[in-house]
Image (tube, coloured by chain):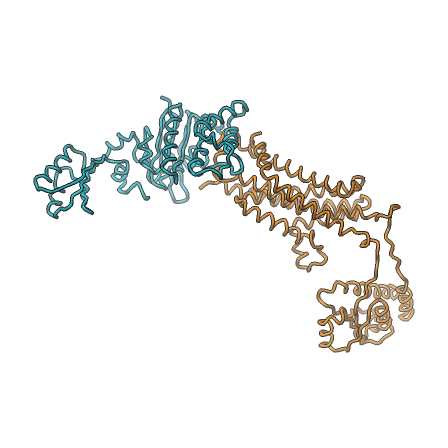
Amino acid sequence: MQTVVKINNLVKRYGDLVALDHFNLEIMEGEIFGLLGPNGSGKSTTIHCLLSLLEYDKGDIKVFGEEMKPDSYHLKKDIGIIMQNVAVFDRLTVEENIDYFCGLYIKDKKKKKELVQEAIDFVELNDFKKFYPKKLSGGLLRRLNIACGIAHKPKLIILDEPTVAVDPQSRNNILEGIKRLNKEGATIIYTTHYMEEVEQICTRIAIMDKGKSIAVGTKEELKSMVKTGETIQVDVPKLMENQLEQISKLPHTKKLSYENEVLHVQYTKGKHNLIRLLDYFREQDIAFGRVTSELPTLNDVFLEITGKELRDQ
Amino acid sequence: MQVFNTYFRLVQRKKRLILMYIIIFTAIAVVMMKVSTQDENLEKYTRRSVKISVIDRDKSSLSKSLKAYLTDQNEMVSIPDKEKRIKDELYWRNVEYVLIIPENFQQLLEEGQKVDVISKKIDDAVNAVYVDEEIKLFMSLFSLYQSADYSVEDAIGHVEKDVAHEVLVNTVTKEDGESAFKVANEGQYYFQYVPYVLVSVCILAISCILAMFYQEDVRKRCICSSMKLKDQNQQLVLASLLFSFGVTILFIIIGIVVTKGELLGQINLLFYSINALAFMFVSIALAFMLANLFHSETALNGCSNVFSLGFCFLGGIFVPLWVMPDSVVTFAHFVPTYWYVQANDAVSYMTRVTSPFLKEFFLNVGVQMCFAVALLSIGLVVSKKRRVFS
């Protein structure tokens, strides 16, 4: 597989603030690569540097094996960009907007017309072709935004937080669309701070914090990097202090809390944790209700590596 | 030419507003042109008579002669020589002008010393200008005869004889009875209003359209495309120039139509057009600067009114500068429309192309171009600052 993007020791400073600190990244052809990190971790700065929208202080960026510069127009023709904010003309219709942005890449009128129609079909905006953006709902606007970025059939598509402030239905629609684009052969770079989205679509993930890549791999690889195991949740009407203490002493127990008649027990990696807990309840004759078990999330990975939550940063 | 075509597609979306401005402008310009060049205004001449009071503290033959001359020309009102009373009479508009001839007026003049009469007038007395001119004329003639070694009495006698001549005022007319200056004046009044509509239309169209291209995220998307940024900018510049050139030419054609083709045969049309084209560059530069400063259409619509009306009021388009206070006239020099009006006036007074006329005209046009360069530079600086995304 060919390397599509290679970033080496990238440093970007804003005065005293280090936005990117010797950041490295390698993205292979055909991947859906997720850049996951809290707000301010450097995701958008990485994308801006990658697209030559920002000058950087040190390092080098290669796209399709060639150095990326502001005037690398032969490389830009194979890149599609979808920003967080909807970037379209209010006074142009859906079709005219897609035509305009496609026309910045494609000169042949006939080919452009075909590509515009394909993009409209792809985002299912056929019924809204003659609509002005102001007449579209939030979800439809996002689809238009995507259509404008992909109409010229780029080999590399960069999506910078495209689902911020989008309703769940439209979000699923967008994520499904990204998977389809990938199936059609495009390499995708997807930045977000929503770990669920990354888990849902990305083949490989880089977790970013303070301008650094703190972990890279598939979601399984990332989860295996940490000691955190499953979290078991049990509805228990009554538990005594001494019983809680005994549960906390069971093997592999990492953290425990009991609130509103619900017991949460987080384990480090190990086998038979659930059986051991239920055995204890039976021995102590403790009545219990619903039992659920959750595998570690990327948030747990982030928490263990950085000591802070991925959410609410 | 993707950017160029899209620019004009966006112009089309604004065509109703642009047309509305063009129609309103044409209506205003034609009405003002007709009102300002009506025949009775040009061909009838009546002398003004001002309510004046002369306080003669000198009682010399010169002062008496001056008083007699002013009495003959104006409506004389007698008031006592008391400061408070003079102020009251002026305040209540019982007199418009009070002339005080100081003591030893004639004697000091005979000795060759400089001595001025004292004039008091109501603040907004436009008619006072006539009295000033009459006094100036009388005293100039007296000085002339005095400098030619005439005795005071002889000089006064000659001055009295000179000022007694009735000046016959006739307006020059063509065979068909129409004023010979009328066409030129119609052209002046029509072209005087061109900056108003040029500024309005350029901000409403060019600024609003450029602002759409300059939206941060749209701009990012365009920079990331495979079309060279230089090509995109060139297409935007070309489209803006073509649009504003088209609008200016349209106004020149309307000008020819509303003057019933009379302007066509005159050299004035060429200079009116050059002046309008120079102001076109000012309007484009202003539109470019504003597009970089404001990205909201509402803000730009506001700017359109502020700049078009502001320029027109301050520059002497809507209100002649001679009725404005000196401070406003001084400030007007910093407004491009002032220089446009100066050039326009010069063209209207021009009967044949002379070197002083060309010098004056191109100086005014040159200053307008300097304004265009300054506005463009500000726009470029703002644009560069905005390009640094953070």
Q: Is B265 placed left or right of A121 in the picture?
A: right
Q: Is A172 placed left or right of B284 in the picture?
A: left
Residue B378 image offset from top left, x and y in percent: 57, 45
Task: Please state the total of marks drawn on the protein image.
Answer: 0
Q: Nearer the viewer, residue B311 or A147?
A: A147
Q: Quadrant of residue B266?
A: top right
Where's the N terminus of chain A, which quadrant? top left
Q: Is residue A48 visible?
A: no
User: Which colour is chain A painted?
Assistant: cyan
Residue B25 image offset from top left, x and y in percent: 68, 46
Q: Nearer the viewer, residue B125 or B135?
A: B125
The chain letter corresponding to orange is: B
Q: Is B23 placed left or right of A293 in the picture?
A: right
Residue appearing at x 89%, y 66% in the figure: B159
A137 lies above or below B90: above
Q: Quadrant of residue A63?
A: top left
Residue appearing at x 47%, y 31% in the figure: A127
